[in-house]
Amino acid sequence: MALIGLYFPLQNWRLILTRNPIGISFLAFAFLMAGIAGYISLALHLGLVGLAAGNISNFIFTALILFLVWKRSSALSKKEQLAGFIILALAVLFLTAINTVGRQNAVALSGIMGAAGIVAFYPVQNFDLLRKRDPAGLSLMAFIFLAVGLFFYTLLGFLVDDTTIIIGNGFSLVGSLIAIGIILRYRHKPAPALPRVKHRSAAHS
């Protein structure tokens, strides 16, 4: 848990130091934010204050990532930006609907939302990274800590014989390892030319 918890501060620190975080997918982190919101809802319905607090912290870190990418990334297209905001809007609507059903259904739906958002994050981020071939803004160390933490969570799933833990964390582990491989492959190589999108700050000047 501690290793996975280090992912967000390390990733945010890297992003703060990066003027143009081309490698980060706005859409992918929108999915991640929606997933974290689902797990916050799950924790609150189950009365797990510690789990809720941890995910609220991750939610704040993810919100900062989205804001910095929105402000700084020259590769963020209007299409991806719109798709990301649609995902966030749908997440709000889904969470609102969850509160209208019984507790048992709310727990199940919150868990599904959390898992769906987290699982969607990896293929969207990795596909975007493969397309851009520029990992600027992504922290290699953050993904290494994440992968190690996910490995132990997957191992825990085998020890307690819980298929959901094995599948969820195993899928995330594979996704994080792919991200590490892509970052290592392209971090010292010149990236292909991409259509440049005018910065939001420049648009108001």
Image (cartoon, rainbow, N blue to C red):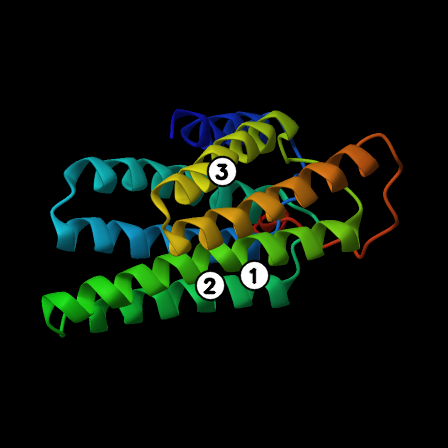
Q: In the drawing, does residue 189 fall left or right of residue 102?
A: right
Q: Residues within 10 Å of mark 1 (few under 14, many from 20)?
A: some
Q: Residues within 10 Å of mark 3 (few under 14, many from 20)?
A: many
Amino acid type at mark 3: Leu
Residue at 67% x, 51% y is 126
Q: Are marks 3 and 2 in contact (CB under 8 Å)?
A: no
* Residue named by callout 3: 150
What quarter of the picture does the N terminus occupy? Answer: top left
Identify the residue at horizontal 28%, vertical 41% (top origin): 56
Residue 145 location, x and y as percent? 54, 27
**Residue drawn where x is 34% and y is 43% of the image:** 160
State the residue position of label 1.
81
Residue type at tag 1: Gln
Residue denoted by label 2:
85
Which label was assigned to residue 137? none
Q: Amino acid at mark 2?
A: Phe
**Secondary structure state at the residue bearing disc 1:** helix
Residue 164 percent across, percent down from the top left? 39, 55
Identify the residue at horizontal 66%, vertical 60% (top origin): 77
Judging depth in this view, the residue of 5 and 151 nearest the camera is 151
